[in-house]
Image (tube, rainbow, N blue to C red):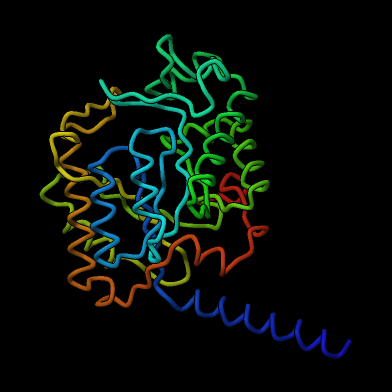
Amino acid sequence: MKKLLVIIFLLAFIQSINSQIHSEEKLLLIRCDDIGMSHSVNLAAKELIDAGLKFSASVMVPCGWFDEAVSILKDAENVTVGIHLTLNSEWKNYRWGPVAGVSTVPSLVDSLGYFFPSRAKFFANNPSLEEVEIELRAQIEKAIKSGLKISYLDYHMGTAVDKPEMRKIVEKLASEYKLAVSRYFGEVDVNSIYSVPVEHKFQHLILVLDSITTGKINLLVCHIGKDTDEMSALVDQNEFGLKEMSKHRNAEFLSLLKAVTEDEFEKRKISLINYKDIINYYSLDKMKSPLETGY
């Protein structure tokens, strides 16, 4: 009994030390979305991995370049891998559909068997909640079977958590597969560089880094890619989509690359973390929906 009490005390002490470290450090969690969407995105991710950047990589399982993403991410020790739960296919002339199969989840697709390009069109088709769960589960299962070590879930274009009943499905799957959910640990989003003009993205990133303070988990969501013919051919069918998206993604990628190669994080004493670190700081049962906490 005495030995058990000593163990409990030590565990509590270690947890308090971790909490103290967390409160005194400038923490930045970089999450790069859409990995596996295209070859250009994968090439950018690989270059950041090779440069030593520590980040979380959110993978789109239904996309055509998923297999290549698996080969890039499988042994990347500086990256934590998550699933970018996907229920939309937004690009003109480059579409994808459900992992579970069109006949299994017919309410989630258009007449050609592709996911809808927007949230509005997705919900206008009255998607079946049962089919949503089937498809999201299929994406998780495929990622696991690929050999990737999956640590967390997030959501492409926000669709999978757009409605309370959809969010419950994501939470149920996270609990079942013992996965974290992005933004469920009180992460605070810093100013995105997504829509900043291409020529100002690096300067904006530096301003973001200068603004980071202690006592919270700062989350920077990025959309990277290389400005190739493949990427420049993609046109977002949503009105909010960026023009010359390929150049924007390339500028985000180059900004992150420059920041890591020029030690911009170290200069500001910023500790880069990923979702594996967060899971180690806290247990999964400490997760709370941002709708409950107001994060």
Q: Is residue 80 left or right of residue 136?
A: left
Say which quadrant the N terminus sits in. bottom right
The x and y percentages for residue 7 are 75, 85
Residue at image position (44%, 59%) is 80
Q: Percent position (x, y) of residue 287?
A: 62, 55
Q: Residue furthest left?
A: 199
Which residue is rendered at x = 63% and y = 77% of the image?
15
Query: Residue 168 is drawn in which quadrant?
Result: top right
Q: Dividing the picture into quarters, in which one does residue 136 lie?
A: top right
- Give the answer, above or below, for where 108 lies relative to 24: above
| Observer-nearest of 246 and 144 | 144
Q: How many marks?
A: 0
Q: Is residue 290 left or right of residue 190?
A: right
Q: Position of residue 96 (x, y in %)?
A: 38, 25
**Residue 179 in the image: above or below residue 18:** above
Residue projecting furthest to the right: 1
52 over 85 or under it: above or below:
below
Residue sitting at x 61%, y 19%? 128
Front one among 2 and 24 = 2
Residue 32 as seen in the image, left or right of residue 105:
left
Residue 279 at x, y percent in the picture: 56, 63
Q: Residue at x 26, y 30 (%)?
A: 241
Q: Nearer the viewer, residue 257 or 97?
A: 97
